[in-house]
Image (cartoon, rainbow, N blue to C red):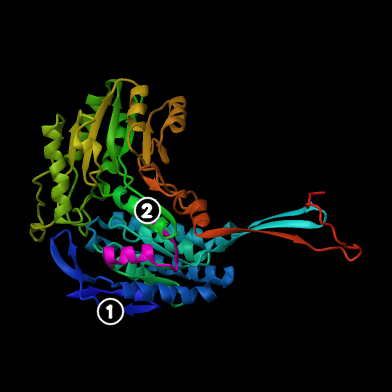
Amino acid sequence: MKTITHWIDGKPVEGTSGRFGPVYNPATGAQEKQVAFATTDEVDAAVASAKAAFESWGDSSLAKRTAVLFKYRELLDAHRDEIAELITAEHGKVHSDALGEVARGMEIVELACGISVQLKGELSTQVSTRVDVASIRQPLGVVAGITPFNFPAMVPMWMFPLAIACGNTFVLKPSEKDPSASFRLAELAAEAGLPDGVLNVVQGDKVAVDRILEHPDIEAVSFVGSTPIAKYIQLKAVEHGKRVQALGGAKNHMLVLPDADLDLAADQAINAAYGSAGERCMAVSVVVAVGDTGDELVGRIAERAKNLKIGPGNDPASEMGPLITREHRDKVASYVASAAEQGAEVVVDGTGFSVDGHPECADGFFLGVSLLDRVPLTADAYRDEIFGPVLCVVRAETYEEAIKLINDSRWGNGTAIFTRDGGAARRFQLEVKAGMVGVNVPIPVPVGYHSFGGWKDSLFGDLHIYGNDGVAFYTQGKVITTRWPDPADAGGINLGFPSNS
């Protein structure tokens, strides 16, 4: 059985812990690989390699860094199908979805290629007589990222390309459920000319995570995952004096006003709720139907949901693949049953689903799509982040009732409004309490040069990920005040308090 190892100091490193995690093909349910779990010594070795590499990489020219990144982008483009195949094999998402993931990750590589613009700094001349003040940004040193299973290539690329472009060195701890993509990203970075130690990958579980959070030579930690773990990451990282950005969970609402194009809204609700089997932190998990739109909208969503093609991700006909593990599939299915018990109407029940035409998928981690209507706000299906192909519909009589319902949620990651009314859309984008807002766009993930991140229990830390916030997170500011006396100045001693004159 193939073992996925670590990448330390520019080469593969076999694990020594004797502990391994299973890596499944979710479409078949079979374990096809195993991943080595790092010891604290192996994490320390990765950090030591990164620390040594920082001595030269942090002092390297922007031209050298961007030359490597341009080559890296070229290699990613050449190998995008291969990376997508690794994602499909270990995560389960369909190949087209995996290709989209790679493309969105490459956006941040492209942003990093232009880092010279982001690091230009500022200069004010003659702030006082012959005194100039400059602001510059410098790298932190060794930084780390802890990334989730649902985007095994994209989320790491949200972090390390920008971090290394800023002059830092990086230690990545990817999800143990689908580790191959991140290992391949490191291999390609080395092929692009990235010096040994600038990017390291340690596989593992909580042992590796805790050592990263405690290690005195790691200056900052980026994290994407569930809210409980994000809270843990923030508290433990801050306890050890680190800068932290921890992106947590979500319960994203899509508000549909009576004037909306209901066919468009139904199409986009399907795409946003069931794409990638709902395993997206930006998935729409709640549709808020305002006024008398509910019955017709639910009918149109149900009609589309029943016709979705669910199957293995490597089948071009499949529109949705399996979930990541058997345990997660069963947990998601339990929300459908409990919703019925707690007062919701089950319009489409995806539990008990089996794949047709693929006997090899009999034991795969598949679940059909579910649609729940008139979901009580007290139901677990509404209150919890399900992270699966379950869409809840709640009803609101007015816009005011709908906006209060959304703003009362403890999460504030992303939200959307569907309407033809520009005034209503403008009011919504200003009044809604969420970090990312879509107007007739159901999954408003920002492009690379804007930053990604939510509010409330969806973000812990001050700065969002990538974009300008990402550059700020991976650098520290320095202000330099300079006086070059004119040779004609007499100089002399003056003990008075300096003033601007």
The image quadrant that residue 494 belongs to is bottom right
CA gap, disc 1 to disc 2? 31 Å
Q: Nearer the viewer, residue 190 or 9?
A: 9
Residue 304 left/right relative to 74: left
Q: Amino acid at mark 2?
A: Leu
Residue 49 screen position, x and y as percent? 42, 76
Q: Residue at x 23, y 56 (%)?
A: 316
Q: Is residue 218 magenta?
A: yes
Residue lying at the far front in this picture: please name it: 495
**What residue is pinned by disc 1?**
14
Q: Which element carries disc 1, helix, strand or loop?
A: loop
Where, quadrant-wise, is the N terminus in this rendering?
bottom left
Q: Residue at x 49, y 49 (%)?
A: 450
- Which circle marks residue 235 in the picture? 2
Q: Nearer the viewer, residue 221 or 412?
A: 221
Residue 187 in view of the camera: no
Label 2, residues with CA under 10 Å away: few <14, some 14-19, many ≥20: some
Q: Amino acid at mark 1?
A: Glu
Q: Which element carries disc 2, helix, strand or loop?
A: helix
Q: Where is 404 relative to 67, above or below?
A: above
Residue 120 left/right relative to 271: right
Q: Nearer the viewer, residue 240 or 402?
A: 240
Q: Mark 1 or mark 2, which has the lower sequence index?
A: 1
Camera-near label (1 vs 2) is 2
Residue 224 screen position, x and y as percent? 35, 54
Q: Nearer the viewer, residue 416 or 124?
A: 124
Q: Is residue 160 magenta?
A: no
The image quadrant that residue 424 belongs to is top left
Q: Residue at x 14, y 54 (%)?
A: 327
- Which circle marks residue 28 in the picture? none
The residue range painted magenta reads 204-222
Q: Where is 309 relative to 69, above or below?
A: above
